[in-house]
């Protein structure tokens, strides 16, 4: 059995509580204060690879560039994983502050399902699958796309509320 990733949106006013709670009480506190969550189960590995957030594979070629409404090149949407460590949380627990959540939401808004499809169909992705770099690579594109749209909606709502995001593996 593999890992799954958990994302929780929490009010910015609760950051101090998150930084001070004991690990034994961490999950109870998250359940109490969260304003939303996103738990992509096993598709997370594929999703984050395609967002260019995993390992050494990068989608830097022109065909994979993402342009904003003004035609400027955007950052890759790997910013969803650019948090700061939350030392007292579970393994690999990270915290994205409200500004980072807003930035991630803006970047994800420019990254369409069509961009995701292009990366899913790419030689780069196929090579990662054949090398075994992506766990449970049997997911169909529609499942990965649905997880992506759910994640994008999660970040958009969290940004609208001014929330921080905590994420970790379970």
Image (cartoon, helix red, strand yellow):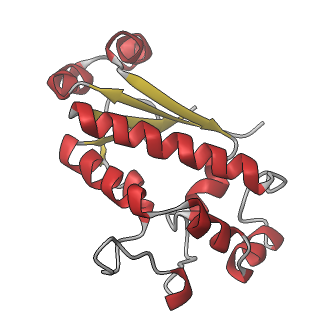
Q: Position of residue 61 (x, y in %)?
A: 52, 89
Indicate the quadrant containing the N terminus: top left, top right, bottom left or bottom right: top right
Instruction: Please tell me how many numbered marks the rendered image carries.
Output: 0
Kindly identify the residue that appears in the image at 28 percent across and 76 percent down: 70
The foreground one among 128 and 87 is: 128
Q: Please tell me which residue is depicted at 36% across the width and 19% down the height of the picture.
A: 34
Identify the image quadrant of the C terminus.
top right
As drawn, which residue projects farthest toward the front?
69
Q: Is residue 32 above or below residue 37?
A: above
For image coordinates 26% across by 24% down, the residue present is: 18
- Residue 169 horizontal/vertical position (percent): 54, 37
Q: Quadrant of residue 132?
A: bottom right
Q: Residue at x 65, y 45 (%)?
A: 146
Reply above or below: 95 against 71: above
Does residue 115 show up?
yes
72 with respect to 40 (left or right): left
Residue 4 visible to the viewer: no
Identify whether 94 is placed above or below 24.
below
Horizontally, is 141 left or right of 49 in the view?
right
Q: Residue furthest bottom?
A: 62
145, 38: nearer the viewer: 145
Q: Looking at the rendering, which quadrant does residue 66 occupy?
A: bottom left
- Percent position of residue 6, x then y: 51, 33
């Amino acid at each position: 059995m593999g890992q799954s990733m958990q994302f929780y949106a929490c009010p910015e006013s609760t950051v101090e509580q998150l930084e001070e709670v004991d690990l034994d009480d961490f999950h109870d506190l998250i359940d109490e204060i969260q304003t939303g969550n996103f738990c992509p189960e096993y598709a997370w590995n594929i999703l984050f690879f395609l967002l260019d957030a995993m390992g050494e594979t990068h989608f830097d070629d022109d065909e994979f560039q993402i342009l904003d409404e003004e035609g400027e090149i955007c950052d890759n949407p790997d910013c969803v994983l650019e948090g700061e460590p939350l030392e007292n949380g579970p393994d690999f627990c990270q915290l994205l502050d409200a500004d980072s959540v807003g930035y991630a939401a803006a970047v994800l808004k420019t990254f369409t399902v069509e961009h995701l499809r292009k990366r899913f169909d790419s030689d780069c992705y196929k090579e990662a699958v054949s090398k075994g770099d992506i766990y449970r690579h049997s997911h169909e594109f529609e499942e990965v796309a649905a997880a992506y749209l759910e994640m994008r909606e999660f970040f958009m709502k969290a940004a609208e509320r001014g929330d921080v995001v905590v994420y970790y593996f379970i």
